[in-house]
Image: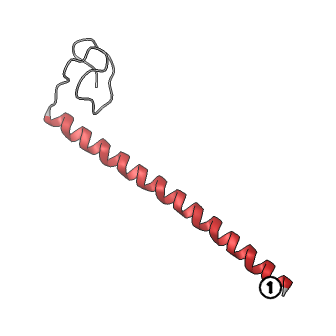
Amino acid sequence: MICPKCHNENRYDALTCDFCMAPLPMTKERKLEIAKKKKIEKKAKLNKSLTKLLGLLIGLFIIVGIVVVVYLIRK
């Protein structure tokens, strides 16, 4: 969001300008845009978390597999 007073670039969800502290206009279109971008960010964060979880589970299964194979070889 560009500040109408000082023309500073701010985050899309900012309520006031980071530079001059002027209130940024909040229109219906901007509210919808903020909601849409937050939904996209939330989905991306969930996907990132699921990817990390999947990687941890794969690593855990590999470690368990190695332990089982070593146990069977020594037996």
> Is residue 28 rendered to the left or right of residue 64?
left
Q: Is residue 58 above or below residue 75?
A: above
On-image quarter of the C terminus: bottom right
Q: Residue at x 31, y 42 (%)?
A: 37
Which residue is label 1 attached to? 72
Q: Residue at x 48, y 60 (%)?
A: 50
Q: Position of residue 69 (x, y in %)?
A: 78, 79
- Residue placed furthest toward the left: 28
Q: Quadrant of residue 20?
A: top left
Disc 1, SS: helix
Q: Position of residue 8 (x, y in %)?
A: 32, 16
Q: Position of residue 43 (x, y in %)?
A: 37, 52
Q: Quadrant of residue 41?
A: top left
Q: Residue at x 18, y 36 (%)?
A: 29
**Observer-nearest residue: 52 or 28?**
52
Q: Is residue 47 above or below residue 62?
A: above
On-image quarter of the N terminus: top left
Q: Quadrant of residue 28?
A: top left
**Observer-nearest residue: 67 or 12?**
67
Q: How is the image coloured?
A: secondary structure
